[in-house]
Every structure is written in C-alpha cells, then in structure tokens.
Amino acid sequence: MKKVVLAYSGGLDTSCIIPWLKERNYETIAVIGDVGQGDNFEAIKKKAIKSGAKKVYCLNLQKELIEDYAFKALKAFALYEGKYNLACALSRPLIAQKQVEVAKKEKANALCHGCTGKGNDQVRFETTFRLMVPKMEIIAPVRVWEFKTREEEIDYAKKMGVPVPVTKKSPYSIDTNIYGRAIECGVLENPWNEPPKDIYAMTQDPQKAPNKPEYVTIEFSKGTPKKINGKAYGAVELVNKLNKIAGKHGVGRNDNIENRLVGIKSREIYENPAGTVLHLAIEDLASLVLDRESMQFRGQASQKYAELTYNGLWFTPLKEQLDAYFDKLHENTTGTVRIKLYKGTATVVGRKSKYSRYKESLATYGKGDTFDQKMAEGFNHLWATPFMK
C-alpha cells in the first residue's frame, strides 16, 4: 500500500479525497495547517480519522505565515493586479513545505492536494513539491476523479458517511486564514450579481458600521509593523488586533475580477481588514522617507513580487533576491502613520518619521519659506532644452 501525505482542510474537496484514496488502496496521512482560520481542529482531526486517514498532523503555522510570508509581501508592497494582497496565496507554499517535511518523516511515496485544474493553488502546491522533492509522485484527485460538480461531491460524501461544511443551497468555496478570507462559487460566479451580505465574516456591513470614525496609528520599524496606537504587539497579535479594529468599520472588502495563472478570469470576494490598513500605511510612510527614484523604481519590483507569489514561485531565486532588495529599501521606513476608519473606508490623515524627506521650509508658501524661487528660471530652461527646435 502506498503512503500519501494530503493537505487536509476538512472542506468539501478534501473531505471526499480521503475515502476516494482509500478506495484506491492508498494510506493517507493528513496534514492540517492552522493558519488562523479559526476551525475546531480537534473535530477536523477526528473527521479525518473517521474518513479513513491513518494519521493526522495539525500544525500551528500562524506565526510563520505572518512573519515569514505576509510581512515580507507587505514590505514588497505586493498587491496582485494592484488589488489583491495575496492573503490566501501566501499560505500555500508554507503548507506545501510542511507537507514535504511530513512526507520525508513518514517515508511517504506521494503528496496530494485538493486543488482544481482551473485554479492557482494547484500550481502553488505542485511547484513547491517539485522544487523540494522533484521525484516524488503528486496526486491531484479533483483533476481526475469522476465528480463533475460540487453537488456530486456532496452526494458522494453523504454516501461515504462524511459530513461536509457546505450544502447544495450554500455551495460557496471559502478559504480563510489570519490575514484574509476568499469566497467564490455559487451566485458569485455571475460577475453581475451583487455579493450576498451573509458571505462576509471578517468585516461589518459598512452601512451598519459605527457612525463615528475611529483613528488608529500604526508604527513601523524598517518596514515591519510593530505597534498599534503606541502599544507593541507580536506579529500574530498585531494582525488579529487590526482585523478587529478595521473589520468593525467595514474596512477591507474587495470584489475582484482577476486573471488566474491558467488563463481564465475569476470573480473573487476578499476580506482583508488588517492587510488593507497595513498596505495603506506602509505605502504612505514609504512616500515620506524614500527618495523619488527609489519610489518610482520599486513599483516594477513590487509588481514582479506579487506575480511570483500569485504564480506559486515563492521558493525561487528571483523572489529571494527581491526580498534582499526590499530589506535594503526599507532601512529608513521607520515611523508612524495615522489612519481614519469610517464606514468601509480607510484614509491616511497623518504620518511622521525621523527619516522624513519632507521639508516644511521648502514646501511652505507661508512664513519660513527657504526655497529660492529665482533658481526656477534656469531649471525650467534646462528642462525644456532637449525638446526645443
């Protein structure tokens, strides 16, 4: 009997995979990654065993996800297609890496995931697998099994006595971690349909959010967030705290049409309250402390970093090189940003840093102006010279 290590969430697909593999004479070891989705992991472990898993690993990966993945992407200003902060994409290489570690420990023959052939996650898992254990077999049941619809999967799970967290009336595919939440399928597959109010979990309906705005300060040290409202937090605690503050005001919702790696467009609903505020804050602080050339050039690097992450290329040389670049870029990104939260919006209303390049004496039009305007005549002449006939 072959031994296979499965990335197991307890969702519809992986709930079906264990009995499906058992029917084909595979011994399954399930790996559950606790990335802050808030599940009852004891119940999921029991369900995996009941479904036929031989062994279950439940790994707390929240600290690694935030410190080694999310905050690196934050320092890179990485937003896929300028919108998506990659919350769910960031968890995939981490979980895949842990699968490989378990597979080596258990002397397994194969690695398995529950991703579809249409999505990006298959690439994120399998690229990581192939870079780390290139000769190990990879099994992707959802790409080859006999079920054509999620409704058929639900029927199969019921037949095998496996409880699943979805119904035919609520067929959403939901992925959650501490840094964000993604929802797709069901009525959302028609891009004209407004998202139902009941799909959101991390953010308050902006119309029902507090009528009074709330101000929050985020303090960074070399591009890494360290404090909220003057109080220091660990990485996980900081994100959890900011999720609650921003989520209460309905901040962090994103209804997005994006280009998947496989070439099709998809409609995704994202909730990223902490990530939304942190990206807004670091972008603004960087504009205060970086010179013009650095600010303009890093946009190219940020776009490439987001694409590498989205496309499953986290463990590649270029991504590692970009990390070194952004570490250097943020040597002076230390300071505080003040943000106003109000009914679904987050607005920067103040920023300060000991490394600020802003000089009030040069910018002011009032008393204390030290800018010599006489220099402007020569500057304007030189600027136009290359284009004059």
Image (cartoon, helix red, strand yellow):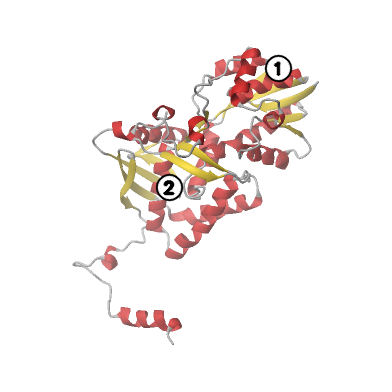
Q: Is residue 333 above or below residue 28?
A: below
**Residue, x 32% and y 51% (percent of image)?**
351
- Describe residue 210's horizontal placement relative to residue 313 as left or right: left
Say which of 369 and 388 sits in front. 388
Say which of 273 and 254 sits in front. 254
Q: How far across and down, in percent of the image, does residue 98 sit?
A: 64, 32
Work out which residue is located at the far right of the displayed protein and give it: 1
- Describe residue 363's horizontal placement relative to residue 60 as left or right: left
Q: How far across and down, in percent of the image, does residue 152 sit?
A: 63, 22
**Residue, x 63% and y 12% (percent of image)?**
161
- Compare marks 1 and 2 and give the one earlier in the sequence: 1
Residue picked out by circle 2: 221
Give the numbered dot on residue 141. Answer: none
**Residue, x 63% and y 46% (percent of image)?**
313
Give the numbered dot on residue 54. Answer: 1
Q: How far across and down, in percent of the image, does residue 266 sit?
A: 54, 41
